Amino acid sequence: MSLDVQAIRAQFPILSREVNGKPLVYLDNAATTQKPQQVIDALVSFYTECNSNVHRGAHALSDEATRRYERARDVVAAFIGAHSRDEVIWTSGTTEGINIVAKGMAQRLTAGDDVIVTEMEHHANLVTWQQACKASGARLLVAPILDNGALDIDAFLALLGEKTAFVAMPQVSNALGTVNPVHRLIKAIRSRSPRALVLIDGAQGVAHGGVNVVTMDCDFYAFSGHKLFGPTGVGVLWGRRSLLADWPVWLTGGEMISEVTYQDATWGALPHRLEAGTPHISGAIGMAAGIEWFSALDVTAVQAHEKALLDRAVELGEAFDGVRLIGAAPDKIGVYSFMLSGAHPADVGFILDKQGVAIRTGDHCAQPLMKRLGVPGTARASFSIYNTLDEVDAFFRALAKARDMLV
Ligand code: PMP
């Protein structure tokens, strides 16, 4: 089955707008995806029909809001294959999810423990662990990558041992699109470092289909709604119930307690013990709508389409004088990170924008990775299911203009 890309595009109102007098070619999907009408409708419907706080009110609107909000949790749990809805913790996004885990680990790590991350981390999965190590005296080890942006598997395996207390790594690199063989790596971690806990940063991996946290066998999986066709400001931390049940609480306040006196408090049960305060109710509902929209697509067709877009970009790039692909790992998703020789990525991005082509330029929140690759930053086109081969062609036509103007 192939994707009906035109039918998909028709569901994204923003894709029919113009930018700078040109049809929008949106190739910044690794930063955030656009939202289908189904998500927009879910948000509007919440605010027009049942806006209310959850769990608090003994009234009809609150009941309806609570029902929609908790149903959203069920949708997420089913989508990632969680054993229990109680393992789905609402967060503000991947960053907060990783912080919940890292702040908790900082209390459990000791000097003599190793924490492993990779050279391809987004700052969200690097700075957090760096700080947890600083606070606890644990050692931070950074698994190297190869020059093509793939993880150096042998070097990664060599870091594992009895001292390994935690491994945090991305399913997919945001800057390069490299896909890590997380199933295989986690198997190796389980056999070589039996006490290690594993967090997978799923921010980029989750929107490409087929995530199952149980078969992956990670301990924590963090992701954001906005990279999955849902709203910003909402995300999910999944964790094993046995770990989350007594994980150090992150925020204290309303909704997460069991009993409170002036001098003391006890914490409530999962999932609420890690969700203090009024949650992003509409965000959770919108995130579930995005997941439901995405889940209706055929995963194999989604992956095949994204691969076709990347293949086209690679083919056009190879024929394009002056373009250097940064990160040509054999297993990667639709991220085309590149340098145009003689031009600064920011200037390339600016000229593309004038032609309606939206890409991202800079360090992609991965400064150490840029240093490792010897580049100041890159220009990055990232594809999603609603992009077309024609848009990839338009991107390279725009790039040819940028080259004419800049080089
Ligand atoms: N990790 C990766 C790999 C990402 O791409 C991102 C977002 N760019 C994050 C973490 C952080 O996600 P958020 O900003 O939604 O919290």
Image: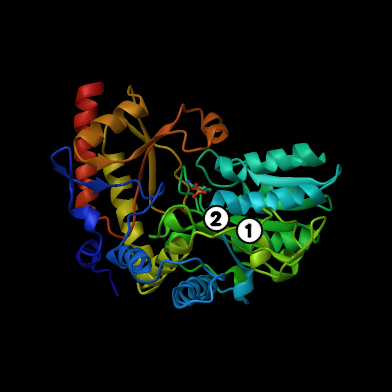
Please give the name of the residue rendered at 30% of the width and 33% of the height, measured from the top-left corner.
349
Element at badge 1?
loop
Name the residue that disc number 1 marks: 276
Q: Is residue 198 above or below residue 406?
A: below
Q: Quadrant of the C terminus?
A: top left
- The residues bearing labels 1 and 2 have C-alpha atoms spaced at a distance of 28 Å
Say left or right for 272 vs 41.
Answer: right
Disc 2 crowd rating (10 Å Cα; few below 14, some 14-19, many 20+) is many
Determine the residue located farthest toward the left in the rendered image: 21
Please give the name of the residue rendered at 83% of the width and 50% of the height, measured from the top-left corner.
163
Q: Residue 171, labelled with which disc?
A: 2
Locate residue 303, reporting x and y percent. Answer: 38, 63
Foreground pick, 124 / 339: 124
Q: Earlier in the sequence, mark 1 or mark 2?
A: 2
Disc 1 crowd rating (10 Å Cα; few below 14, some 14-19, many 20+) is some
For badge 1, the amino acid type reads Ala
Q: Is residue 294 above or below residue 150?
A: below
